[in-house]
Image (cartoon, grey):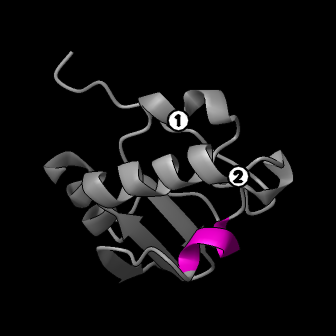
Amino acid sequence: EKYDIVLLESFNDAVIPSIGLAEHVDLIITVTPGRAFIYDRTTTKSVLQYLTQRVVDPSHLVTPRFFSIFKPKEILNTPLMFKPGSHNMLKPVVDFILRE
């Protein structure tokens, strides 16, 4: 009850799995092996507004289209995880989400 966090995961470089969800998204975190690119609320809203107003073809809703225009608030190094387990190495990402 303290937090209302929902995580949407997209594949194939998709910014968002469905453009219809844009009004419900508060933060974008793009993850690559070893890095997390974190966009704050203001930038996330700008990205989504840009995409919903200018992109006609849904196949263009991919991260390379906005990486060159919008810069992340933070870029964090993340550990490569070779097997599941408990760890605190992603704590900076979680802390950023909770702070926003």
- Front residue of this view, candidates 40 and 59: 59
Instruction: Please tell me which of labels 1 and 2 falls first in the chain.
Output: 1
Identify the amino acid type marked 2: Val
In the picture of the structure, the residue carrying the numbered disc 1 is: 22
Residue at x 68% of width, y 75% of height: 64
| Residue 64 colored in magenta in the image | yes
Q: Residues within 10 Å of mark 2 (few under 14, many from 20)?
A: few
In the picture of the structure, the residue carrying the numbered disc 2 is: 55
The boundaries of the magenta stretch are 63-67
Classify the position of the N terminus by image quarter. Answer: top left
Q: Helix, strand, or loop for circle 2?
A: loop
- Front residue of this view, candidates 25 and 56: 56
Q: State left or right for residue 76 relative to residue 57.
A: left
Residue 5 in the image, given as x and y percentages of width and height:
35, 31
SS majority, magenta: helix
Residue 83 in the image, given as x and y percentages of width and height:
64, 65
- Front residue of this view, candidates 52 and 42: 52
Residue at x 83% of width, y 49% of height: 57
